[in-house]
Image (cartoon, rainbow, N blue to C red):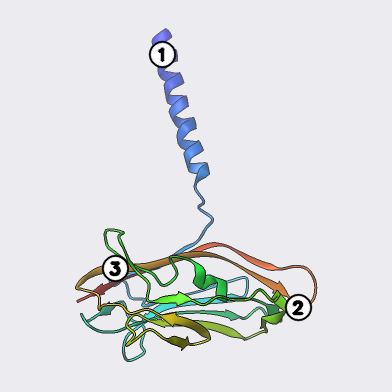
Amino acid sequence: MKTKKKVLFVSLLSLWITAGMTGCNKDDDPIWEISPDGKQAVIEQKRNGIVFKFCLLNEQGKPATVFKEGENFNFSFRIKNETGKNLYYNAYPCAYSDSFFSVSDSSGKTVGKSYEALPQTDIGIAAYPFNNNDSYTFKVAWLHPEKSIVQGGDFRYKSLKRKPLKTGSYYTSFSHKFKLFPVSGNKHIETENIHFKINFKIR
């Protein structure tokens, strides 16, 4: 009898631990990922009327996940307001993230970034109107001829010199929680912590 009780206790304990571990996972946080093996070369999703588009562009300006060795490419991330309302949104802080437009190899080792975010003066959210149908685009090349101040889409940054990536598998990923403020009223729009990841190859 004692043996049966012990087995039952251990089974219930294991079940409780497993349930507890599962409950700790943030399954609600969306993970948007593409790879060269799939048919999609663009991550495009909509949350609360806000459209997100993330991709890599080849030298012809087309979305791609496979590039030739020595070929330059651009990171492109766009956020667009399709809520039907005028908002305020300062997109630039996205660029301060260590992982934003950063490249890592297939083992997870960081290769680095090709830009440095410029300092931004805090002048209040009202200085950043983001009206209905407005969009903000970050665009950064991996290879730059020299260090300089570059305008990539709506994003102004300091370029860093990088070497062409060698043949192999890589990825670029970042996570961000987006928060936008209404022009009138006090109900802001805030997303979950969204995870973006693009797996790509150099051949």
In the rendered image, which quarter contains the C terminus?
A: bottom left
- Horizontal and vertical percent position of residue 12: 47, 25
Q: Which residue is mark 1?
A: 4
47 versus 151 height, above or below: above
Describe the element under mark 1 as helix, strand or loop. helix
- Horizontal and vertical percent position of residue 110: 33, 63
Residue 199 located left or right of residue 50:
left
Depth check, front residue: 70 or 24 = 70
Describe the element under mark 2 as helix, strand or loop. loop
Q: Which residue is mark 2?
A: 183
Residue at x 41%, y 13% (from the top left corner): 4
Mark whose residue sits in front, 1 or 2:
2
Q: Quadrant of residue 136?
A: bottom right
Instruction: State the CA–CA distance, disc 3 to disc 1.
Output: 52 Å
Describe the element under mark 3 as helix, strand or loop. strand
Dot 2 amino acid type = Val
Mark 1 or mark 2, earlier in chain: 1
Mark 3 or mark 1, earlier in chain: 1
- Horizontal and vertical percent position of residue 129: 68, 82
Identify the disc placed on residue 170: 3
Residue at x 70%, y 72% (from the top left corner): 181
